[in-house]
Amino acid sequence: MAGPFYFDHAATTPIRPEVGEAMAPFLGAAFGNPSSTHRWGREARAALDAARERLATCLGARADEVCFTSGGTEADNLAVIGTWRALRKGGRNAVVATTIEHKAVLAAVHQLAKEGGEERLLEVTPSGQVRAEHFDTVVRDDVAIVSVMWVNNEIGAVQDVPRLAGKAKARGVFFHTDAVQAFGKVAIDTARQPVDLLSLSGHKIGAPKGAGAMFIRRGTPIESLFHGGSQDRGRRPGTENVAFAVGLATAAECALREHDAECARLTALRDRLESAIRARVPDIVVHGVGGMRAPHILNVSAPGTDAESMLMALDLAGIAASGGSACQSGSVEPSHVLVALGVPAEIAGAAVRLSLGALTTDAAVARVAEVFPTLVAKARGFAAV
């Protein structure tokens, strides 16, 4: 069967043709600096302003509530660190996140603890859902910001972000969500959902790596991480990347337009793949079951195997997958997400993430369904020797 087959869309996605076409002028003749007042600068400024307006429309936001960044990591850091620093002098010294956040959020929270902040981590259920009773206990009026990932990048668990954001707002606490894996997979409308800050990354939806954005609701206090310019109302100083802003807005519009059909397609493919693997590997462990899951992520562990060997074998068979977060590639430590779920170390160490997207076809699913169980059997045979 022809290959190779790409099952690592949660790590990154190919740039969409329409995104490349939209960006092309700003990588060539339309090269102006949007802060310049001459015709080249005015052309760049018009494109940047239009991209901001277009992305805001996709989020149900106002244009001045969109801040372009270099990606999800910068957006997460700006949201968590920037908001906490802006509020700490007013007595709100605590910051809250879940135990299964992306490392971009967890590392930001750890940094604030070094700066004198109080770090609080929310417990989750075995399926990856925030424990409501723990949320009510931890999120008090001394909290500056709470950050809850909308869709987990390793297991696909979907949080009820609108409900949690509403509970935080009732306590006067600002709420951030890392929506890097959520955009295009769940319904996002900041006009109706009470989130204050929301992070996006372009390369998860067909835009280039290095393109990102953050929604910052009007009235949300935030301190810039950078200094040296007045761009983006001082929230993110530095010359704006016009081409990438245009690309991100284009990709977001495409993802929103295709949302319903693509989610249905990916859900059907994921379920078919999961069922096929279960049929031939009856003791397979599927992580995140029991709660709502995003349609594009399937994370499984075959007892008696290890992720590193399975990933190498899959790669040799022409199948690209990962052991969890792409940011953790090469780590010998078990996934912090699976550890937080209470998964035993030997099962966590066998976890393989298969993530679906634009390149996933019926033939690709059939190939993985054929190869994966065979590789499990071989790995177990080697382990038994």
Image (spheres, rainbow, N blue to C red):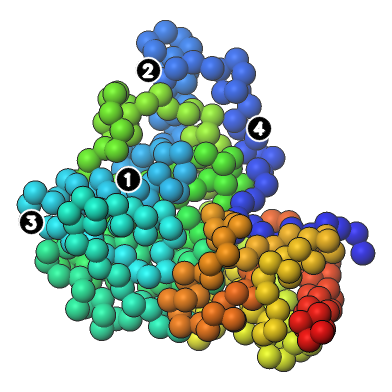
Q: Can you identify the residue that label 3 sits on? A: 91
Marks 4 and 3 sit apart, C-alpha to C-alpha, by 49 Å
Which type of secondary structure does the marked residue at label 4 adopt? Answer: helix
Say which residue appears at 76% left-offset and 82% top-offset: 383
Classify residue 259 by image quadrant. Answer: bottom right
Q: Pick whichever, 184 or 280, lies toward us.
A: 280
Determine contact: label 3, label 2, CB under 8 Å.
no
**Residue 169 x/y as whole percent:** 19, 65
| Residue type beneath disc 1 | Leu
**Mark 4 or 3, nearer chain start:** 4
First-in-chain label (1 vs 3): 1
User: At 71% from the left edge and 72% from the top edge, which residue is drawn?
Assistant: 269
Answer with mark 2 or mark 4, whichever residue precedes in sequence.
4
Rounded to the nearest angstrom, the CA distance separating label 2 from label 1 is 23 Å
Q: Nearer the viewer, mark 4 or mark 3?
A: 3
Above or below for 326 versus 332 = above
Other residues around mark 3 within 10 Å, as few (<14) / some (14–19) / many (≥20): few
Query: Residue beneath label 2, please?
Result: 35
